[in-house]
Image (cartoon, rainbow, N blue to C red):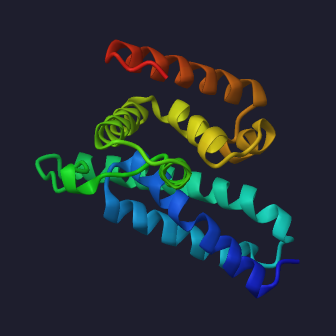
């Protein structure tokens, strides 16, 4: 059974990544924040008494379901109010740093020229753009496996699909990202 402290620590540890993942899915910061907050509330309210080891998978599943619910509400809303469009994509001021941890580690390990830093920042922006272009299930599997660092079984449970499907989605996502980046002259 998770203690109140364990639940709080867990939520703090996943908050930022969950927000970024949600933004990649819904492409709206305010909606992403609502989705993450709703997911956290549901986890605390309905599953706060579960063992701490079960919290990561439960939270990922709740977050996925809340995101799907948001899309369903949007579909209904758009059907009713098809001429209203108050949702905007993140602009220049809404940058999201996918590899923030990697960047800070790299910065602390070596000093680089301004040209190198600019080039790396451009590559990271291109990666972020291409991740947003992936089909939803590929993007979800990719982010869970390589960003959330979940294993195949955990990802399958969170996505509600088979392990084989997770592997297929991840493989296709990696191939699509590699192809798109090579087309832009980026070779990692």
Query: Which residue does the image show at 58% across and 35% down from the upper left?
Result: 142
Quarter occupied by residue 137: top right
Provide residue 13's location: percent of width, then percent of height: 63, 68
Instruction: Quarter of the image for the N terminus: give it.
Output: bottom right
For this orientation, the residue located farthest to the bottom is 4
Query: Considering only vertical position in the picture, is 23 above or below 188?
Result: below
> Which residue is depicted at the point 66% across and 54% down?
61
The image position of residue 44, as x and y in percent, is: 67, 77
**28 w.r.t. 38: above or below:** above
x then y, percent, for residue 170: 62, 27
89 sits to left or right of 14 = left
The correct choice, above or below, for 87 with respect to 15 in the image is: above
Q: Is residue 88 visible?
A: no
Q: Position of residue 14 (x, y in %)?
A: 61, 64
Report the residue at 37% width, 33% height from top.
123
Describe residue 17's horizontal placement relative to residue 127 as left or right.
right
Residue 81 visible in this rendered orientation of the protein: yes
Residue 55 in which image quadrant: bottom right
């Amino acid at each position: 059974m998770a203690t109140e402290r364990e639940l709080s620590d867990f939520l703090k540890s996943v908050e930022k990544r969950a927000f970024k993942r949600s933004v990649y899915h819904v492409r709206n910061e305010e909606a992403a924040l609502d989705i993450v907050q709703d997911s956290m509330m549901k986890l605390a309210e309905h599953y706060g008494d579960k063992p701490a080891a079960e919290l990561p998978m439960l939270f990922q599943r709740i977050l996925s379901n809340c995101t799907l619910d948001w899309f369903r509400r949007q579909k209904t809303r758009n059907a009713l109010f098809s001429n209203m469009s108050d949702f905007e994509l993140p602009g220049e001021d809404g940058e999201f740093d996918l590899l923030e941890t990697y960047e800070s580690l790299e910065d602390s390990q070596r000093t680089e020229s301004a040209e190198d830093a600019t080039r790396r920042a451009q590559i990271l922006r291109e990666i972020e753009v291409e991740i947003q272009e992936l089909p939803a299930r590929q993007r979800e599997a990719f982010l869970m496996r390589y960003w959330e660092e979940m294993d195949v079984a955990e990802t399958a449970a969170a996505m509600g699909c088979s392990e084989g499907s997770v592997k297929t989605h991840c493989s296709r996502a990696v191939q699509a990202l590699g192809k798109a980046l090579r087309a832009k002259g980026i070779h990692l």
